[in-house]
Amino acid sequence: MSPRADTLPAATAVRRFGRAQRGVHRATAVLMGVCVFTAACLYVPQLAQLVGRRALVVTLHQWSGLALPVPVLLGLASRAFRSDLGRLNRFGPHDRTWLRAALRRDKRPSSRPAGKFNAGQKVYAAWIAGATLVMLGTGLMMWFTHLTPLVWRTSATFVHDWLALTVGIVLAGHIGMALADPEARRGMRTGSVDRDWAEREHPLWRP
Amino acid sequence: MNPEQPPQAPDDDGRDTRGTPVGRRVFLGTLALGALGVAAAPTLQRGLESFLAGASDKDPTGLTGLLPNGGGFRYYSVTSSVPKKNADTYRLTVDGLVDRPTTYTLAALKALPQTRMVQDVQCVTGWRVPDTPFEGVRLSRLLDAAGVRSSAGAVRFTCFDGAYSESLTLDQARRADVLVALRMRDEDIGHAHGGPARLYVAPMYFYKSAKWLSGITVTEDVEPGYWEERGYDIDAWVGRSNGRDDEPTS
């Protein structure tokens, strides 16, 4: 009877990510996956014994690492992707509230105000982008050994190793949080999320 | 500063896209920290190495061995899998420019006089394991037994993994600190460390110490080995090759 009731099912889905953002995320995830897996095969003795083929694994690691920033660079051609980068960059007063609540382990939605991206996602995005470029820079110094003096190369190895460990842990956190939130995963997979979820997790977002 | 105002709060064209560019600062800050890390690495590394060396002595789980610079050997193999050889199936052949080509069983190698050495092991990728005992037959003894011809100038080593190879000049091969090692850390060498017998070239980077040694061929000239065809130095003296300045091991 009420026209509102008829339109309700359509209104429960909210558009979150377009094709560009999902494509960039997927390609970056695959490349990062190859980087991490090959790194583990080069580094963890048990995996190294299982896989062997050292020259091949090194080649895979180098090229997937080199390609890692490419999806984001290609994504810059998309207006939707650029505007999401803009949202990730800008922190409002609500983000400060969110971060304080996160530090206090306060999980109530009311104390975690967020726009399209919450403050945690913003910090993660900025950090992983910076860390990826540091890994790329130090990786290139180890790859093209004649480009830099020896001291630099030893130092680059040191930074590359320890940052790899840190990236691995942070990445595990990223994947763990995604595993715990099926609706967030659906948003990245299909581009749409449930309106209730959006209002609960991202109350300040006006899609 | 009224916190009770979410209704007009950030939307797509509102505050969500304005605000402080903290993301850019975190991004640039991470880059700066990375650069600072490279600059400060020599100091940081010394401190961490001594701390981790102490920690790994008291670590029953062996997890510290997985940390960067955590100490210990790392397993490198260039093939997908390596066949296992034991005292019954292992053979070491000595051939090429020699008067008496010979094939040794493991028992025959064990019956020869053994030499024990305790030196550091230095890998070209940076890790170093201090004071590692190796024990085995001096390579010079096997060469003398085979009778090296005067035209010979080098020795080529092949391995039963089917891919790896190494080489030394004859002078290098005759050094007293070059062994066909049967024991490492006072145990028989296990499969993962290249057992039952591997080469041990004490003064050189560890890639020269070919694992799973199965063939010694005396040749006229040095033939580059597996990694040497991929850019490593053939004369791999620790501290004087591969652009590195590690403390010499022997």
Image (spheres, rainbow, N blue to C red):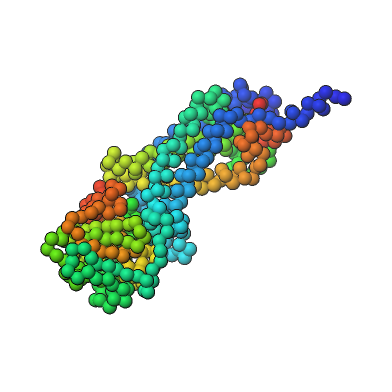
Instruction: Estimate the x, y position of residue A4 in percent, counting from the top left.
Output: 81, 25
Instruction: Estimate the x, y position of residue B115 in percent, counting from the top left.
Output: 25, 72
Q: In this image, A153 relative to A97: left or right?
A: left
Q: In this image, A189 relative to A157: left or right?
A: right
Query: Which residue extends farthest right?
Result: A1
Q: Residue at x 44, y 52 (%)?
A: A41
Relative vertical location of residue B124 with respect to residue B178 in this rendering, above or below: above
Q: Answer yes or no: is residue B3 visible.
A: no
Query: Which residue extends farthest top?
Result: B13
Query: Which residue extends farthest left?
Result: B150
Q: Nearer the viewer, residue A130 or B240?
A: B240
Q: Nearer the viewer, residue B146 or B114?
A: B146
Relative vertical location of residue B30 with respect to residue A2 in this rendering, above or below: below
Q: Answer yes or no: is residue B75 visible.
A: yes
Q: Residue at x 47, y 65 (%)?
A: B60
When asked about the image quadrant of residue B183, the answer is: bottom left
Q: Residue at x 57, y 36 (%)?
A: A121
Quadrant (top left/top right/bottom left/bottom right) for the C terminus of chain B: bottom left
Q: Nearer the viewer, residue B201 or A60?
A: A60
